[in-house]
Amino acid sequence: MIEFFHEFDCLESDMVTLKIVEKNKGATDMLPFYYYDIFNKAGEHVGKISVRIGNNFHSYYNGHIGYEIFEGHRGKHYSYEAVKLVLQVAKAHGMKELFITCGLSNDASIKTIERLGAVKKDIVKIPKECFFYHEGIQDYCVYSLQIN
């Protein structure tokens, strides 16, 4: 059973602020996670990000971090800044390696992930046993990011 840390309810950098929306204990296939809204310094809600804690079969394919920047706010490195902030959450939970995944055709996300210093491990097809197989996701890039 995970113990969530309250000191991560609000995370800030020079570019973005993350405000906690949900702390979810997970379920059979779903890892526990922190879920945040992303705001720029002007206070605009520009996206969302989650960090999943722990490892299971699905985390290799689904990744430990998921993010979305809303249209009109893309191209400003908000996802990069937000990921850097949630790394401290994963580290506080004892994680040393994170998988970050994205669609093979998602060039913007690939650039963000590689800018973080993650290394591509694999290009995979989502297996039928994976809980999000039926979402029709195409080939996925799997990256590994080491946390110091």
Image: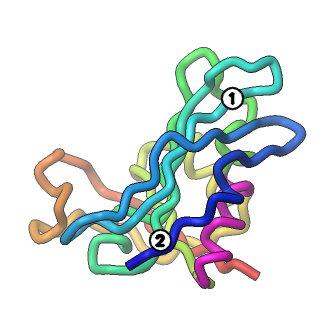
Q: Is residue 31 left or right of residue 75?
A: left
What colour scheme governs how the chains and residues are painted in the rendered image of this protein?
Answer: rainbow
Residue 17's label in the rendered image is none
- The image position of residue 11, as x and y in percent, is 74, 48
Q: Is residue 107 visible?
A: no
Residue 53's label in the rendered image is 2
Query: In this orientation, which residue lies closer to the viewer: 21 or 142?
Result: 21
Query: In this orientation, which residue lies closer to the viewer: 142 or 131?
Result: 131
- The image position of residue 119, as x and y in percent, is 61, 73
Q: Is residue 3 magenta?
A: no
Residues at marks 1 and 2, CA–CA distance in whole angstroms: 23 Å
Return the residue at label 1.
39
Q: Amino acid at mark 2?
A: Ile
Query: In this orientation, which residue lies closer to the viewer: 16 or 98?
Result: 16
User: What segment carries the magenta color?
Assistant: 83-94
Question: Considering only vertical position in the picture, is 62 above or below 144?
Answer: above
